[in-house]
Image: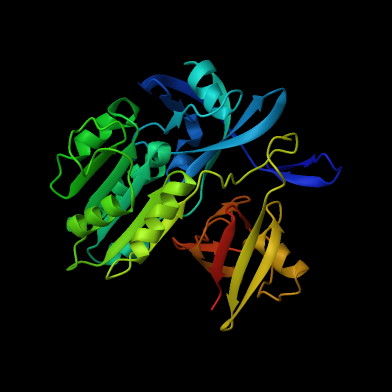
């Protein structure tokens, strides 16, 4: 069941349903990262996920409950897995790298988010992926999906790290590289490769040369990126300066979709929501992530079509153009929403900016 809880200001905040999951394995990937497998038991079907989606763990950190979200990276039929890089003391990454043990039971919110548009699979594409450090975690599932979705998709990954010792999921990437349709190019800051293009910090000149080398003009392209802000800005800048501009969809770890009422570490989360309705577009600014999109529209005086608020009528169905949302609860039985679409009465904003189209 979902429940209500008091925020620090005394107002009610929505708290999502969690599933008790047993940790089945903890494996060190690098000196600063681990692979964690967990078992949702009878709820395992709820943990089937779309490329780039993440789960949220309800953890007690610094004497307060909080939610921390991580990408699922497992193969489709395997137990759910996350890969976590240690980036800060006392946070979720420290918990998974230093404290979690096999047999622990953790409360987990099932997968949420939208990164990969399944319309891409309607015809052959060249999928370009740009990752730095732990930015590989949302993109490895994109690569795996693309390779399985069509026999004529091709996938290229450009992956930047400080050294070979810092490459997360190296074993999985090496296995994927057995496919002639998947190619990974490592850029290592310590110069370990001894080659100019793959050694040292990735800069504008190197990235431009890589795009010239790896882009496939004869195929439509879809590009995704994840990493530190400076890395993503570099990819955007160089991509837009190409003879045929390359537009990439970003995945940002800063967009934590959930906040526990006890969590004082994260600031109050809000989003800007762009709504296209009847051909007109309006931006609703600073929407609380505790509000559904329909509630946000009501408060902004925007009349969305809706006959109910329980996911039954489907009149508030909208295409998710960009960003991602978090689903409040299960919609009415037997009524499925097509991939890439959401119900505004059941979904809350989960990224800094969400764009939807209601026609």
- Give the residue drawn at x 70%, y 43%: 267
Q: Is residue 69 left or right of residue 238?
A: right
Q: Quadrant of residue 82?
A: top left
Across and down, in percent, residue 298 comes to 75, 69
Q: Quadrant of residue 186?
A: top left
Q: Can I make out residue 52 in this image?
A: no
Across and down, in percent, residue 42 comes to 49, 32
Q: Is residue 276 above or below residue 195?
A: below
Taking depth in this image into account, of 150 and 282 the one nearest to the observer is 282
Taking depth in this image into account, of 188 and 139 the one nearest to the observer is 188
The quarter of the image holding the N terminus is top right
Taking depth in this image into account, of 208 and 119 the one nearest to the observer is 208
Q: Can I make out residue 107 in this image?
A: yes
**In the orientation shown, which residue stands out farthest toward the right?**
10
Across and down, in percent, residue 97 comes to 48, 21
Q: Is residue 119 left or right of residue 354?
A: left
Taking depth in this image into account, of 336 and 83 the one nearest to the observer is 83
Across and down, in percent, residue 160 comes to 33, 40
Q: Is residue 131 left or right of residue 156?
A: right
């Amino acid at each position: 069941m979902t429940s209500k809880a008091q925020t620090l200001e005394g107002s009610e905040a929505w708290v999502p349903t969690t599933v008790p999951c047993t940790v089945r394995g903890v494996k060190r990937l690098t000196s600063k990262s681990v692979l964690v497998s967990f078992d949702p038991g009878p709820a395992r079907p709820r943990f089937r996920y779309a490329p780039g989606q993440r789960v949220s763990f309800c953890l007690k950190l610094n004497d307060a409950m909080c939610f921390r979200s991580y990408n699922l990276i497992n193969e489709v039929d395997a137990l759910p897995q996350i890969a976590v890089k240690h980036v800060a003391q006392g946070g979720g990454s420290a918990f998974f790298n230093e404290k979690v043990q096999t047999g622990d039971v953790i409360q987990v919110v099932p997968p949420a988010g939208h990164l990969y548009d399944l319309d891409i699979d309607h015809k052959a594409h060249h999928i370009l992926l740009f990752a730095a450090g732990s930015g590989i975690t949302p993109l490895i599932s994109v690569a795996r999906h693309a390779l399985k979705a069509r026999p004529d998709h091709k996938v290229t990954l450009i992956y930047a790290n400080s050294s070979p010792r810092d490459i997360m999921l190296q074993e999985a990437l090496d296995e994927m590289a057995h496919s002639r349709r998947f190619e990974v190019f490592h850029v290592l800051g310590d110069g370990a490769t001894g080659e100019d293009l793959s050694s040292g910090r990735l800069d504008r000149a190197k990235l431009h040369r890589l795009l010239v080398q790896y882009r496939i003009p004869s195929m439509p392209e879809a590009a995704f990126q994840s990493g530190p802000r400076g890395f993503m800005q570099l990819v955007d800048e160089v991509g837009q300066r190409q003879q045929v501009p390359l537009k990439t969809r970003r995945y940002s770890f800063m967009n934590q979709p959930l906040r526990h009422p006890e969590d004082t570490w994260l600031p109050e989360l809000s989003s800007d929501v762009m709504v296209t309705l009847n051909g007109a577009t309006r931006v609703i600014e600073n929407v609380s992530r505790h509000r559904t999109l329909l509630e946000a529209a009501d408060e902004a005086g925007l009349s969305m079509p809706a006959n109910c608020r329980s996911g039954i009528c489907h009149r508030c169905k909208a295409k998710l153009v960009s960003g991602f949302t978090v689903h409040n609860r299960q919609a009415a039985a037997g009524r499925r929403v097509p991939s890439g679409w959401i119900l505004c009465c059941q979904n809350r904003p989960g990224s800094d900016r969400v764009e939807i189209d209601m026609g």
